[in-house]
Image: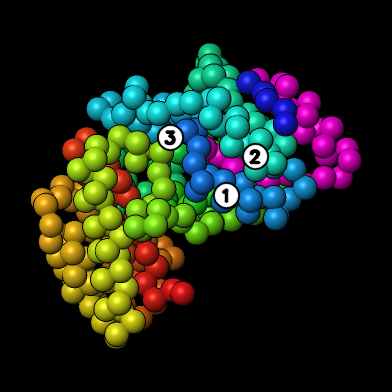
């Protein structure tokens, strides 16, 4: 496995790979890797000859009061997981390598970024699309793999790729969960014992709405109410949002849903903000 911290070194590697006719898949991450990231790497391996994992805690997607300074980092752990999953190259640049002196470009997708996490994290998705576009330009992948836990992010990146005619395929991989249903996330490490014991209420709330959907419920307000009731059935929970939106364009659904619907939510346990979602009725 090759490890690169500079754009030039990675560029020389992928040009050599291209001369051999190999395809490249990219898995962008912010590090502190876990089994969920491992599943993305496995999906990448199924879709390309070479797998690149990027590790970069991107400052432009964090707000002024958010957790960039304490975001978990462990490059030795990350290296071990990448080796175990057969990754070919890791790109772990500095901030200055991604945003060199004089960097003045941003990429922003309108519409899809206005609701859900975009409403409570202004500027977040502009930072995401800018760094992902930069990574696409550096790595030149044929395929990029993202997790469906960040469903809005996945939709935004797909739109960016389509609108800018970037020649690659964006693949979404299913969310990996703990046995009690909690979605794997690097931020789960922030949870204390009590918060971790309560956190599976997120999954139970998704399940309750999904059962109602399968039983024929299509009223978005009722589905949201069921999810909230489950979230709040135990100890108090600080709910950022619970919404039912169109699974394609993420617009809020006000009338009975006839197209595929996404139940998306964000919840805080203390200072830790966790997100999750479910495409209702999907196997």
In the image, residue 177 above or below residue 17: below
Q: In the image, which disc is placed on residue 40?
A: 1
In the image, residue 119 above or below residue 263: above
Please say whether residue 269 is one of the residues in the magenta stretch: no
- Tell me the residue at 42%/55% (across/down): 177
- Tell me the residue at 32%/50% (across/down): 275
- Tell me the residue at 41%/48% (across/down): 184
Q: Position of residue 49 (x, y in %)?
A: 77, 47
In the image, residue 20 above or below residue 44: above
Could you tell me which secondary element the residue under label 3 belongs to?
Answer: helix
Identify the image quadrant of the N terminus: top right
- Which residues, given as a range, are shown in magenta? 6-29
Q: Position of residue 205 (x, y in %)?
A: 25, 64
Q: Residues within 10 Å of mark 1 (few under 14, many from 20)?
A: many
Name the residue nearer the viewer: 8 or 49.
49
Check disc 2 and report the residue beneath it: 84
Q: Position of residue 279 (x, y in %)?
A: 39, 68
In the image, residue 124 above or below residue 76: below
Instruction: Give the CA distance from mark 2 to mark 3.
Output: 30 Å
Check disc 3 and report the residue beneath it: 127
Instruction: Give the CA distance from mark 3 to mark 1.
Output: 22 Å
Name the residue nearer the viewer: 267 or 109.
267
Instruction: Give the CA distance from mark 1 to mark 2.
Output: 13 Å
């Amino acid at each position: 496995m090759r490890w690169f911290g500079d754009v030039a070194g990675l560029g020389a590697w992928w040009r050599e790979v291209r001369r051999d006719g190999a395809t490249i898949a990219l898995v962008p991450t912010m590090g502190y890797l876990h089994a969920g990231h491992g599943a993305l790497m496995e999906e990448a391996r199924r879709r390309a000859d070479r797998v690149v994992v990027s590790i970069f805690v991107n400052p432009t997607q964090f707000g002024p009061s958010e957790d960039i300074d304490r975001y978990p980092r462990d490059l030795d752990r990350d290296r071990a997981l990448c080796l175990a999953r057969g990754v070919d190259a890791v790109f772990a640049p500095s901030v200055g390598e991604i945003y060199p002196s004089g960097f003045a470009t941003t990429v922003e997708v309108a519409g899809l970024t206005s609701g859900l996490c975009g409403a409570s994290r202004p500027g977040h998705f502009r930072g995401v699309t800018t760094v992902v576009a930069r990574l696409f330009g550096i790595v030149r992948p044929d395929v990029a793999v993202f997790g469906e836990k960040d469903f809005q992010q996945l939709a935004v990146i797909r739109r960016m790729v389509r609108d800018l005619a970037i020649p690659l395929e964006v693949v979404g991989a299913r969310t990996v969960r703990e046995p009690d249903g909690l979605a794997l996330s690097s931020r789960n490490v922030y949870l204390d014992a009590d918060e971790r014991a309560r956190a599976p209420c997120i999954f139970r709330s998704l399940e309750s709405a999904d059962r109602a959907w399968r039983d024929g419920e299509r009223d978005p307000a009722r589905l949201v109410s069921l999810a909230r009731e489950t979230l709040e059935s135990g100890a108090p929970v600080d709910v950022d949002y619970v919404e039912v939106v169109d699974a394609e364009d993420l617009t809020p659904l006000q009338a009975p849903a006839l197209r595929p619907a996404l139940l998306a939510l964000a919840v805080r346990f203390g200072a830790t903000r966790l997100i999750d979602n479910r495409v209702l009725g999907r196997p």
